[in-house]
Image (tube, helix red, strand yellow):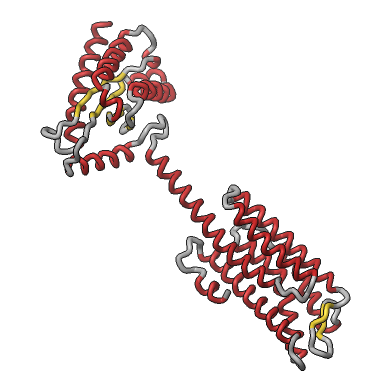
Amino acid sequence: MIFLAIDVGKNSILNKNEVKWFRITFILAALGAFCEYMGVLFDNLDNSPAKLHWIITFVEFSISPFLAVCLAHSSLMNLKVKPILVVLAGNVITQIVSLFTGIIFFIDSNGTFVRGQFYWIYLIFCGISFIYILYVFVLIGIKSHLRNILCLILIVSIVTIGQFANAINGKINSGYASICVTATLLYIFIQNMFRYMMMETIDREKNISNHDALTKVMSRVSFDNRAREFDNKIAEKSENLNFAVCECDLNNLKLVNDTFGHDAGDQYIIRCCKTICDFFKHSPVFRIGGDEFIIIIQNEDYINLEQIKKAVKNFSIEEIKKDIPLNEKRSFAAGFAVFDSNKHFSFSDVLKKADIDMYKNKAMLKDLSKNKK
């Protein structure tokens, strides 16, 4: 336990205050276990030093209930400990009284530990302490969403069996041994729990950064990462690298925002995005700007590219012709470019060609809209 107290802060994800409480727990557990061991040793020695035996037992009995508070603090539950500390302070007072009266324990003329008439008072304090730590374990289980629940049950079982065995039969010296094992396993459990929670947070933040908040398609960050991947594949002249790019630009978004408000504009973006996703069911869609979307066409969409191009063109023309309010339309221009290893030496080369094609399509749709008027 002393070695653990020294090593507890190394390679730990816990902060200084959390490490401090684990260190205190390990030190107190080590001290209590040492006193328990010395008490057993003195019980089995002839002419053991009675006064030393008395003091060692006093320290052992005084520390024991307080370890629950230390374990609670170590478990990072941020519980209010003052009420339980006040209660457990009564145990220390009782032990001090016992030093002079022997009501809790005394050392007989043979130097052997003997339970006093009111030993049950000490057991009550231990029971309060035990109930408190069980409550803490329940909170840990809730906080960890019952992950590794078998490990938590094992920890609770060890401390329960150890404490009850010692309380029933004083010759079974399992009290501090169970506490030492519990403190060690709890440290491992808490470390793993917080490491898992940290990884969940990282994954959640990563997922947020990789997805557009409004449309839920892939974000600009994700697009830049994917573009670098394709640049590497192109530079490596990877065989069978087949893909195309579609660049979509929503029509009249500014006019929709100015006329109907930004909430209507957001709904306009969402509807247009859904339509784009419906056309490209097997390819990732990225929102790289307010009204700009890029699709990296692969898989079945790449095989059916000509049909998709035709379907997108027909849809855009039909949407322009519709006699409905502007904000209810799903109007966008689309440009396509197919990767050619003999002409394109980077992903941006393919994107530039798609960009040129998109502006041609946008100009065509704009002329169509004017002629409609």
In the image shown, does 175 or 68 lie closer to the viewer?
Answer: 175
Q: Residue at x 18, y 25 (%)?
A: 356
Judging depth in this view, the residue of 71 and 356 nearest the camera is 71
Q: Is residue 116 left or right of residue 220?
A: right
Residue 294, visible in the rendered structure: no
Judge left or right: residue 277 versus residue 370: right
* Relative image position of residue 237 (x, y in whole percent): 16, 41
- The image position of residue 292, as x and y in percent, is 30, 28
Q: Quadrant of the C terminus?
A: top left
Classify residue 29 as left or right of residue 7. Answer: right
On the image, which quarter does residue 305 sit in? top left
Residue at 75% over, 68% down: 165
Q: Residue furthest bottom?
A: 47
- The residue furthest left is 342
For image coordinates 50% across by 72% down, the residue present is: 7
Residue 41, image x, y percentages: 71, 85
Residue 226 higher or lower than 38, as above or below: above
Is residue 46 toward the left or the right of residue 25 in the image? right
Is 197 above or below relative to 239? below
Q: Is residue 216 visible?
A: yes
How far across and how far down the image is residue 69, in percent? 67, 65
Q: In the image as oriented, which residue stretches furthest toward the right?
A: 117
Q: How many marks?
A: 0
Res 238 → quadrant: top left
The N terminus, quarter of image: bottom right
